[in-house]
Image (cartoon, rainbow, N blue to C red):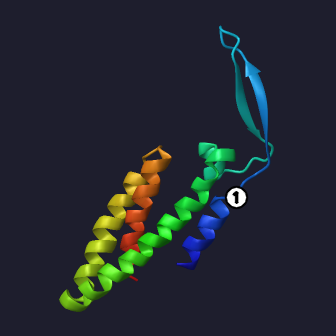
Amino acid sequence: MACQSMLIILVGAVPEYHIEPVTGSPDDDITQSVKFTEDVSSIVTEWYLIKHQAYKVNLAGSLFFAGVLIGNVLFGPLSDKIGRKPVFLTGRMELNWFLFFVIIYNIQFHIITVLARHQALCLGLY
């Protein structure tokens, strides 16, 4: 769990950036291009979560830990009723690995955030 916390903090790092106007369209409309000054890979640089989109970094972490909380509440009594091994094997081996592979092949931030919350439900087994 501590590793997940550190990853959320480190992966959500916001490097310095500059917004530059770009004119290159046929209508001469001015669009903006974001240039990051550091060569850092994070969810901020991948999905350009800056300015009015910056809240999504904290939202992803909050949804993840809300999933862990709900997973603990759901799977605790369930594992007391039917046993810890079946619940652990079902949640960890089947659901968690399935969600992991769906997440790594997905490219949309909203879908990844929802799937990470569901994966955190499975992490509530520990």
* Extreme residue toward the front, this view: 52
| Residue 114 on image: x %, y % | 41, 57
Quarter of the image holding residue 61? bottom right
Quarter of the image holding residue 13? bottom right
| Residue 23 on image: x %, y % | 74, 17
**Height in image: 80 above or below 66?**
below
Q: Residues within 10 Å of mark 1 (few under 14, many from 20)?
A: some
| Residue 27 on image: x %, y % | 66, 9
Q: Which residue is mark 1?
A: 13
**Height in image: 83 above or below 75?**
below
26 sits to left or right of 65: right
* Extreme residue toward the left, this view: 82
Label 1: state its secondary structure.
Answer: loop
Residue 106: tell me if it is visible: yes
| Kind of residue indicated by mark 1 | Ala
Image point 20% across, 90% down: which residue? 81
1 sits to left or right of 123: right
**Image quadrant containing the C terminus:** bottom left
**Height in image: 94 above or below 24?**
below
Quarter of the image holding residue 80? bottom left
96 sits to left or right of 64: left
**Height in image: 25 above or below 95?**
above
Residue 50: tell me if it is visible: no
- Total marks placed: 1
Q: In front here: 13 or 53?
A: 53
| Residue 18 on image: x %, y % | 80, 39
* Extreme residue toward the bottom, this view: 80
Image point 79% across, 47% down: which residue? 38
Image point 42% across, 53% down: which residue? 103
